[in-house]
Amino acid sequence: KGDDMEKLYGPVMQMGFVVDNFEEPIKHWTEKLNVGPFFILEHLDLKDFQYKGNKSIIDFSVALSFSGNTQIELIKQHCDTPSIYNEHSKIKRGSLHHICRLTQNINKSIEILESQGYQNIQSGETSDGGIKFSYLDVHENYGSILELAELAEENLAITEAIKNASKNWDRKNSTIGIEEILT
């Protein structure tokens, strides 16, 4: 069964943190931890968002960077919509909120995890269909929620471009526009 899990999910590729603003955490990550640059994706456009089984609309932005092969994601929610970013989690702001693993079949992965006691508490899909995500939690989660993400080829390429930008970072800028690495 352990081998099946490895085939179903990739390794932990992301650590996610919920923050109140991007400026201070990015300053901390870039200046103190030498992780950067960050790419800020403002107001992600979702076509399907659900929290605790209820369809909803959420407004949030993310800032992404890499430390080696691990993506660092900062999430800032701009609205009061109930979500795991502002309601579900008892995890302190700025502390590790979730870990993410990539999957090639998110629905099958969710089914397997639910059979093991996990609950799918939040899920969504970007309007372009490039990213499907689901946050799952289990009673004993040992400090973080599990996110599964299924990325289309184009989004995998963007992720690689962000990783490469981090490897070649000259420490001059703490943030870079995503369009700069996609051209």
Image (spheres, rainbow, N blue to C red):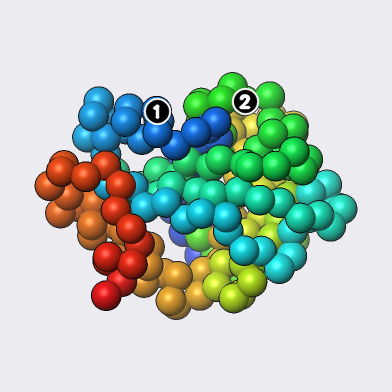
Amino acid tagged 1: Glu
Which quadrant: the N terminus? bottom right
Crowd class of label 1 (few under 14; some 14 to 19; many from 20; radius 10 Å):
few
Residue at 15% of width from left, 54% of height from top? 168
Asked whether residue 48 appears in the rendered view, the answer is yes
Question: Disc 1 to disc 2, how far (Cα)?
Answer: 19 Å
Q: Residues within 10 Å of mark 2 (few under 14, many from 20)?
A: some
The picture places residue 138, in percent across and down from the top left corner, at 72, 38
Point out residue 48 in the picture as x, y percentages from the top left corner: 74, 65
Secondary structure found at label 1: helix
Q: Earlier in the sequence, mark 1 or mark 2?
A: 1
Vertical relation: 56 (above or below) 130: above
Mark 1 vs mark 2: give the one in front: 1
Of residues 168 and 60, the one drawn nearer to the viewer in this rendering: 60
Please name the residue that numbered disc 2 is placed on: 91
What residue sits 35% from the left and 62% below the top?
178
- Please give the residue where the numbered disc 1 appears in the rendered image: 24
